[in-house]
Image (cartoon, coloured by chain):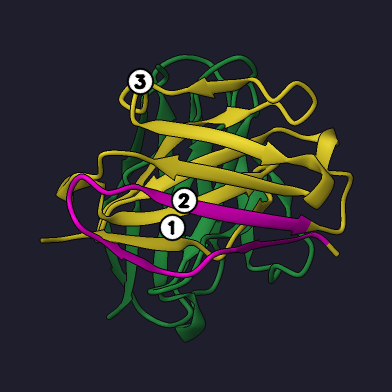
Chain colours: A green, B yellow
Amino acid sequence: DIQMTQSPSTLSASVGDRVTITCRASQSIDMWLAWYQQKPGKAPKLLIYKASNVEGGVPSRFSGSGSGTEFTLTISSLQPDDIATYYCHQYNVDSPWTFGQGTKVEIK
Amino acid sequence: QVQLVQSGAEVKRPGASAKISCKTSGYIFTNYAMNWVRQAPGQGFEWMGWINPNTGTPTYAQGFTGRFMFSLDTSASTAYLQIMNLKPEDTAIYYCVYSTQYWGQGSLVTVSS
């Protein structure tokens, strides 16, 4: 199975900061990567699909980049509503789905 | 508008069975595979497998063979996950997922004596 290594596991930043979360795949997944935001007690919410496509309704401060094995989720200006855990998810064709371990984002 | 509505929380004794439903609407049920994902308390996500909505053929991920069964009622646009011989470590939230984009709200299964 394709392993997804996500970092950092916890991130503490101030409101307005630029925040970056990284996900590395153990082999190339082309651009078959999604990013989710999960708040306590809620289902994950899709933010980014196919590495860099922002899902409809998602604030423009969220962006994704990367291809192959290295991917990044960026929040350009952290807001209090962004407090959540973020997960990457690879859905490469003909491979079992796998997920990163999650990054908990906190306000400093 | 695509919706996946799952059945409610269940509390079961070890050895019992649980059956979770995922009723869909807003899309053609047979167009996309239905995946199932598990999230243990305070943990990340594990992909359990998927079921082909046209053939009803399930594919189970490693670690989810034997006690887990996916099924469909295409006439009701509903997918099911059955877990047999429940163990305490099956305590988790189970999600049905369509096309990475759409997740059910999750069904909590608690296994406790």
Residue B89, compared with residue B30, is above or below; it is below
**Residue A86 bears which disc, if any?**
1
SS of the residue under disc 2: strand
The front one of A67 and A36 is A36
Please identify the quadrant where the C terminus of chain B is shown: bottom left
Q: Residues within 10 Å of mark 2 (few under 14, many from 20)?
A: some
Residue B12 or residue A19, whichever sits in front: B12
- Amino acid carrying label 3: it is Gln
Q: Are marks 1 and 2 on the same chain?
A: no
Q: Is residue A92 magenta?
A: no
User: Nearer the viewer's eye, disc 3 or disc 1?
Assistant: 3
What residue is pinned by disc 3? B62
- From the image, which quarter does the N terminus of chain B lie in? bottom right
- What is the magenta range? B2-24
The residue located at (75%, 31%) in the rendering is B53
Asked if the residues shown at circle 1 and circle 2 are in contact, with their CB atoms under 8 angstroms apart, the answer is: no
Q: What is the x, y in percent for residue A107?
A: 33, 80
Residue at the spot 46% in from the left edge and 85% down from the top edge: A80
Residue at (32, 63) in percent of width and height: A104
User: Is any part of residue A98 visible from this angle?
Assistant: no
